[in-house]
């Protein structure tokens, strides 16, 4: 297939593109500036899209969006988070819908933030959304793909969990304090974290491109959600470091503000029901084996 990727320079995009190429597909990167040969230019801020470049693609993987964990949240930051997801996705999907020859498939990133803070409730793709900021953003983000759906494009909305990789994201930020024996639980440690290794997330994208029975929401998480306490103990064991310095909830809120509740203290116990139903096989279903693979190779 010929596959276009937005967010191609991010953590997931930089791993996905070479894997697609190794699998025999041709990749076109959808970029905001410095478009090279074969790249497709788009500028969501000004509503510009190189529709001629999109005419030839068979599928689009849409990963672009403001980094939610970079910088303290204020009203301007939250507006950028929303616009980079909702408005950019709507622009892309309207553009795809208007093509003479639209792609067959759109894999559009969403997030498990869709579900909000739900304690130990087991969440599937059929569960209702949360009502907090990220829940509202994810609902609007997914709704922004409707122009593509109405144009007959098969749209998969990937609700992605915490992506584990030493190259970026949450795990990369945790490694230094844990290696310096400064790791510990966050809050009471009972909140569920639903995670997925970067390798498995790439596998999920490939699976969704190939399995035409999949459309709508798909939870991209490992089958074993774990509590923050379990995550902390496991990472400490893999690194052979003690994990005795907790980060109390009040301290997290002082340091990070609203972002602490949304990203660290919120509990989201998600099950990959639709992946299981379509026979997807995880390379790393177990956290300890995933961390050892990521950190000891």
Image (cartoon, helix red, strand yellow):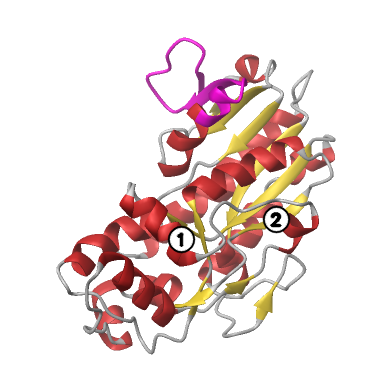
Residue 13 to residue 248: above or below: above
- Place of residue 211 in the rendered image (x, y in percent of width and height, measured from the top left): 78, 40
Q: Earlier in the sequence, mark 2 or mark 1?
A: 2
- Measuring 55% from the left and 31% from the top, which residue is drawn there? 5
- Place of residue 61 in the rendered image (x, y in percent of width and height, measured from the top left): 61, 36
Question: Which residues are drawn in magenta?
Answer: 19-44
User: Which sits in the foreground, 209 or 95?
Assistant: 209
- Measuring 24% from the left and 75% from the top, which residue is drawn there? 183
Q: Nearer the viewer, mark 2 or mark 1?
A: 1
Q: Residues within 10 Å of mark 2 (few under 14, many from 20)?
A: many
Question: Is 269 on the left-hand or right-hand side of 234?
Answer: right
Q: Quadrant of the N terminus?
A: top right
Q: CA distance from mark 2 to mark 1?
A: 24 Å
- Residue placed furthest toward the top: 37
- Measuring 55% from the left and 49% from the top, which residue is drawn there? 200
Q: Does the rendering let one see residue 43? A: no
Q: Does the rendering let one see residue 272? A: yes
- Cβ atoms at labels 2 and 1 below 8 Å apart: no
Label 1 belongs to which residue?
Answer: 289
| Residue 26 falls inside the magenta stretch | yes
Q: Quadrant of residue 160?
A: bottom right
User: Which sits in the foreground, 8 or 296?
Assistant: 296
Residue 23 to residue 244: above or below: above
- Place of residue 180 in the rendered image (x, y in percent of width and height, measured from the top left): 14, 68
The kind of secondary structure element at disc 1 is: helix
Label 2 belongs to which residue?
Answer: 218
- Measuring 70% from the left and 51% from the top, which residue is drawn there? 280
């Amino acid at each position: 297939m010929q596959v276009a990727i937005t967010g191609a320079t991010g953590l997931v995009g930089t791993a996905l593109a070479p894997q697609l190429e190794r699998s025999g597909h041709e990749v076109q990167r959808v970029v905001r500036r410095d478009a090279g040969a074969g790249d497709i230019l788009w500028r969501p801020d000004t509503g510009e899209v190189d529709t001629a470049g999109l005419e030839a693609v068979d599928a689009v993987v849409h990963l672009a969006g403001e980094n939610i964990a970079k910088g303290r949240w204020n009203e301007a930051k939250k507006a950028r988070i929303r616009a980079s997801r909702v408005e950019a996705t709507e622009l892309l999907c309207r553009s795809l819908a208007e093509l003479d020859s639209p792609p067959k498939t759109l894999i559009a990133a969403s997030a498990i933030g869709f579900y909000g803070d739900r304690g130990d409730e087991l969440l599937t793709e059929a569960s209702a959304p949360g009502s907090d900021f990220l829940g509202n953003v994810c609902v609007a983000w997914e709704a922004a793909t409707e122009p593509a759906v109405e144009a007959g494009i098969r749209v998969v909305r990937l609700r992605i969990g915490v992506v584990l990789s030493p190259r970026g994201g949450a795990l990369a930020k945790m490694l230094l304090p844990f290696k310096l024996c400064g790791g510990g639980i966050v809050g009471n440690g009972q909140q569920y974290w639903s995670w997925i290794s970067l390798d498995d997330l790439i596998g999920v994208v490939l699976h969704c491109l190939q399995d035409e029975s999949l459309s709508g929401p798909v939870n991209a998480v490992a089958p074993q959600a774990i509590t923050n306490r379990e995550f902390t103990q496991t990472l400490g064991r893999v690194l052979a470091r003690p994990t005795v310095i907790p980060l109390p909830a009040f301290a997290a809120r002082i340091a990070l503000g609203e972002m602490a509740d949304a990203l660290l203290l919120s509990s989201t116990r998600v099950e990959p029901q639709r992946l299981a139903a379509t026979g997807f096989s995880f390379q790393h279903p177990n956290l300890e084996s995933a961390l050892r693979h990521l950190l000891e190779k």
